[in-house]
Amino acid sequence: MRTEPLAAGPTIHANTPFSCRALPRVVDTGLLRCAVPPALGGTGGTLHDLAARARRLREHDAEAADILLAQRLAIEALVRSRNVALRELWLPDLLAGLRAGTVALDGPPLSGHDTGRGWLLRGRFEHIANLPWEGFSLVAPAHLGEGPASWVLLRSEEDGLSVEAPQATAVQGSGDGLRTLHLNPVFFREDEWLGGPELRTHLAPVAAALSGGQPGVPT
């Protein structure tokens, strides 16, 4: 993975610890495991429990609340995925905060080119939180052939993925900075496929719970 400072912003060195400051605080709250089935490493509970506790967190630690939103959505994507092997590989580290995770809910899906032994994905996502310079997983939509976009899991260790340094005027309350991700291109193996377009529907109530809204009933 490469890092690219913005021309208008300060130069950020690749070893600068961004989300590693807030992620341990999120782990200490126990919220990463809230509303996750105990059989998958969670502590159970409902989305209403998660929403109430997330609101209290945001009142006194907005930075941690932003990191919680990104990390918990990546966790939910794995919880909801039909790819059991992928879930078993990465979910424990995300729940424990040993690896950062984030989800690109906004922006156009990545475009995919079939190489016959995998896909080359290209595109960019803006305003992405919870991106340390090393060791994160990205859940993102991608067009793999015809039809609606699927959801894939991409690792920061892959060649072709680069992160811009945050601008000097970071969004207030987001001390870790929101960044732009470039994929140009990134190789995707089909064994890291998470799910079809229905995954967005599963993520929506969790996103609402963590954003201060009223969570819906997950399907």
Image (cartoon, rainbow, N blue to C red):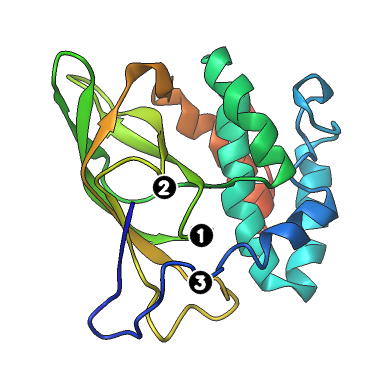
Q: Give the mark, 2 or 1, whose residue is nearer the N terminus.
A: 2
Residue 203 visible in the current orientation: yes
Which marked residue is nearer to the observer: mark 2 or mark 3? 3
Task: Evaluate if marks 2 and 1 touch, with contact meaning CB atoms under 8 Å apart.
Answer: no
Which marked residue is nearer to the observer: mark 2 or mark 1? 1
Identify the element where label 3 is drawn: loop
Quarter of the figure with residue 111: top left
Q: Which residue is mark 2?
A: 104
Spatial CA distance of label 2 from label 1 is 15 Å
Q: Give the mark, 2 or 3, whose residue is nearer the N terminus.
A: 3
Spatial CA distance of label 1 from label 3 is 8 Å
Amino acid type of the residue tagged 1 in the rendering: Pro
Q: Which residue is mark 1?
A: 132
Image-based side of 95 in relation to 119, left or right: right
Spatial CA distance of label 2 from label 3 is 23 Å
Q: Which residue is mark 3?
A: 16
Q: What residue is rendered at 50% in x and 71% in y?
A: 16
Badge 1: how crowded within 10 Å, few (<14), some, or many (20+)?
many
Amino acid type of the residue tagged 3 in the rendering: Thr
Image-based side of 124 in relation to 50, left or right: left
x and y percentages locating residue 47 in the rendered image: 76, 40
